[in-house]
Image (cartoon, rainbow, N blue to C red):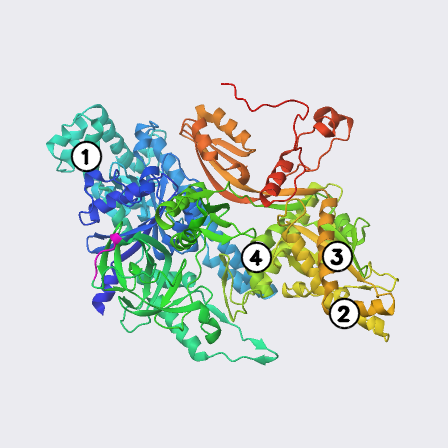
Amino acid sequence: MNDDVSDTHKIRNMCILAHVDHGKTTLADHLIAAAGGALLHPKLAGRVRFMDYLDEEQRRAITMKSSSISLHYKDHSVNLIDSPGHMDFCSEVSTAARLSDGALVLVDAVEGVHIQTHAVLRQCWIEKLSPCLVLNKIDRLITELKLTPSEAYTRLSRIVHEVNNIVSAYKSEKYLSDVDSIVAAAGASGNEDEEFVEDDNDDEEDTFQPQKGNVAFVCALDGWGFRVHEFAEFYASKLGASVNALQKALWGPRYFNPKTKMIVGKKGIAGVGGGKVAKPMFVQFVLEPLWQVYQGALEGKGLVEKVVKAFNLSIPARELQNKDPKVVLQAIMSRWLPLSDAVLSMVVKCMPDPIAAQSFRVSRLLPKREVVVNVSDGVEIEIDRSVVEAAEHVRKSVEVCDLRPDAPCVAFVSKMFAIPVKMLPPSENGYGDEGEGDSDECFLAFARVFSGVLNAGQRVFVLSALYDPLKGESMQKHVQEAELQSLYLMMGQGLKVVKSAKAGNIIAIQGLGQHILKSATLCSTRNCWPFSSLEFQVAPTLRVAIEPSDPADVGALLKGLRLLNRADPFVEVHVSARGEHVLAAAGEVHLERCIKDLKDRFAKINLEVSPPLVSYKESIEGEVSNMLENLKALRKSSDYVEKTTPNGRCVVRVRVMKLPLSLTKVLHESSDLLEDIIGLKSGQTVKSLEIQGMSILQKDNPTEVLKKRVIDAVESDIMSRIENDKDHTDKDHTDKCKLQWLKLLRRIWALGPRQIGPNILFTPDIKAAECGDGSVLIRGCSHIAERLGFTADSNSAHSVIETPSETSHALYTDVEYLESSVVSGFELATAAGPLCDEPMWGLAFVIEARIFPFTGQSDESETHQQSEQYRILAGQVIATVKDACRAAVLQNKPRLVEAMYFCELNTPTEYLGPMYAVLSRRRARILKEEMQEGSPFFTVHAYVPVSESFGFADQLRRGTSGAASALLVFSHWEALSEDPFFVPKTEEEIEEFGDGSSVLPNTARKLIDAVRRRKGLPVEEKVVQHGTKQRTRARKV
């Protein structure tokens, strides 16, 4: 057992994360060449791209999937996972990060920090990984940018500082949320807690510090790299100082005084050399020798021989005599400062072993569960304490990385991946039958063992993310029992058969293809909580409809889609309302790979792919400067739409207002939280204490969290409007607005669409809606407001007036069952707006529906009673409410809302003109443009509509001869300011746009018409153009 523990202490699980083209796969090549057991010759490292074994990856020269390999460095085993850097494949980053304990974050020394660098650092923080920083392409500072050592030091220190700022921002986000929770709980007497928080976070040091040894400076292409530690060891004897003292001094404002042989700071700089010519020790003892070697190799051989003798390097004479100075340089540098030693020694020293890492990461992997006692019909349902204790025992085993054979076996599958059956190594069981029929693909599970020992042939329980061990029989659909056919150690493209795997190892498992779709938890017992779900940085926004070229191949397409959905962790496949098979991907590159896999591997048929299906939303123009007047207008305005049901018994009045943008965003982003609170998901006995990446203390409640977000959003909107409105800056006006909003929030009747959308239905104001015509108002019920934590308004409660007459009693009976009909009509209206049947966005509705008593002959009343038995009135109310809501939107200046990408572009100065030309054709809005210090590159940030982004990267490459690169990531929803029904009325408008008949449709109208054509809705357009002129079909050659 002690041997097992010592072996586990010598395991390191790490992934390589970075922006696209920052050198991840090249770095992995050199590590494989040095420690991969002769899999790759050192001379081929950096050219082969060993981990990119797919044809598409080699053709495009980018990584498209996470792949693992096991390396051996000294007496340690290092499981390395190479991950993609392109934003389209960020889901692969999430799967790699979940199985790792540490991460190598690469940053290009020339390009610096980019948008994907932010994303991978956030992923490290979310998954609680121990990161190390690698600054790559140091050679470009010398050969391309021609920087001096001092300028290079300034640039490198700025990058390290920038990366530290990003990490500290994520830490402070968590710290502030913890402080808010503690202060809210402590109240006025919480001084002790506040002092505790301050002491806990006081003077927190930077995450990445070269003197700590977790920063490496490398050139992956030439195979050399170093940490400060290597130079500290070399200079210790020469300068007569200890290695530790030198390691601390070789970064930052530390200077060496040759006269006193002392290391001094800024205050003692005067004695070094007059103060002006003094150089930091990192420049003097690290960078200047590097620069001299490069200049010597590229210009003359004298210095090269001196370096070879000084460090006693054994370099073959033929390499030193090579006429190409780059070959000579690579031979010297890779032997003087070997890349693999610098990086792998940093991994072993700075990254934790599985035992230490899992005790730190368990709060993310298996968050503490708060057991909530279910109450059904006033009777408490008892919870089986033995199950709770067993589940807690499993969690403890994961926390301590229990290696005993009798410990509960727990593993997490982060993704399924497909490989050709012929590539499976022969095992004792043969090739294994994956149950895919005649398919040539076999599905393997990419997994890590967190506790116990996993054996081939073992039977385990497969738990989905929704599994709850306390519910027993009702959870049968979320748990399956499966037998593991074979276990493999992944070696890049190759697989090595193993009989068992202990906790802390990363393996591939055969035999789970029929049981797991994307990810799952494996456990030897049912009494286990599933691991927390993976968190992805973006959502699949690019959708296309696909169909086979030959209708007879529909079966093959369905089978191919099923396999693709399992093989790709991020793709989404569903059938639309029109019956189309829709494929959703993260971006164009991801979509192209999915289509190619469908054609060549999974379906093996020819496909017809539609143009991208872009999602839009519908809203109204609502920029009202005086929010108080806007709220009053919603209550008392005569600007409403009135419609009557066909039988004349119900009159519906609808008023609509635009919600503040901040409130709309909160509702949109909190949809998962709303599902839990409103109870759309199956009643959950246990709630995770970590919601949407926020750290929530045990005494906090998800309802309180959402309520606080809603109130904060409303207050921030009020404050921003008051800052812009100089006429209403007094405190009374602010308090009035807040009070009005709180009153409104207590009247929330429903949310839509799908009961969790960003549109709100308020209950009608009883006092304002009083009427003496004998009708009864459908008052609604503010139960959603109560569930969100807002106290119900007394006006909106059911206060049925006592009425002795039978007619009134019948009316109130109708009112009760018609409440759901009003809500259904609202849901249908918000799910399909009037412009182009797209969902509504950020609207508030007040619906006053009045039921009138039936007046008619006796035979008619009998007919009426029969019709009411079949709820005909309910259907009429649903249709009338839906039509009235859509008409109200049309009446209040409707606007189209489109999705926007955030675009980061990098281009040389000479190609700025062509780049701006491409952006202007794509309706882009420039946010920021700045020149990168010390380089000829410009960085431009812009917003690009999703509808204009297709083919954007190709057009940009053509326009700039491949010099400019762009990265797109979904940002937000934004309303188009153009009126789709614009008609010139004033003289100035007629002069500018012409009269009504000759006005060309604006952008909003073009987008609406395109969506309507795709959906088969009627479009107003001229069918005949130039009807009086003869048109021939002759072509003039």
User: In the image, what residue type sits under mark 3?
Assistant: Ile
Indicate yes or no whether the magenta region holds residue 423: yes
Q: Secondary structure at mark 3?
A: strand
| Residue placed under numbered mark 2 in the picture | 866
**Where does the image place residue 49, in percent across and percent down from the top left?**
28, 41
Q: State the mark number for residue 847.
A: 3
**Label 3 – label 4 distance at C-alpha:** 24 Å
Disc 3/disc 1 C-alpha distance (Å): 79 Å
The answer to whether one can see residue 664 in this image is yes
Give the residue drawn at x 45%, y 41%: 588
Residue occupied by mark 1: 332
- Tell whether 736 sits left or right of 705: right
Q: Earlier in the sequence, mark 4 or mark 1?
A: 1
Precedes in sequence: disc 1 or disc 2: 1
Looking at the rendered structure, the secondary structure element under dot 2 is helix
What quarter of the picture does the N terminus occupy? bottom left
* Residue depicted at 56% across the width and 60% down the height: 673
Q: SS at mark 1? A: helix
Q: Is residue 353 left or right of residue 85?
A: left
Front residue (pair 178, 334): 334
Q: Are marks 1 and 2 in contact (CB under 8 Å)?
A: no
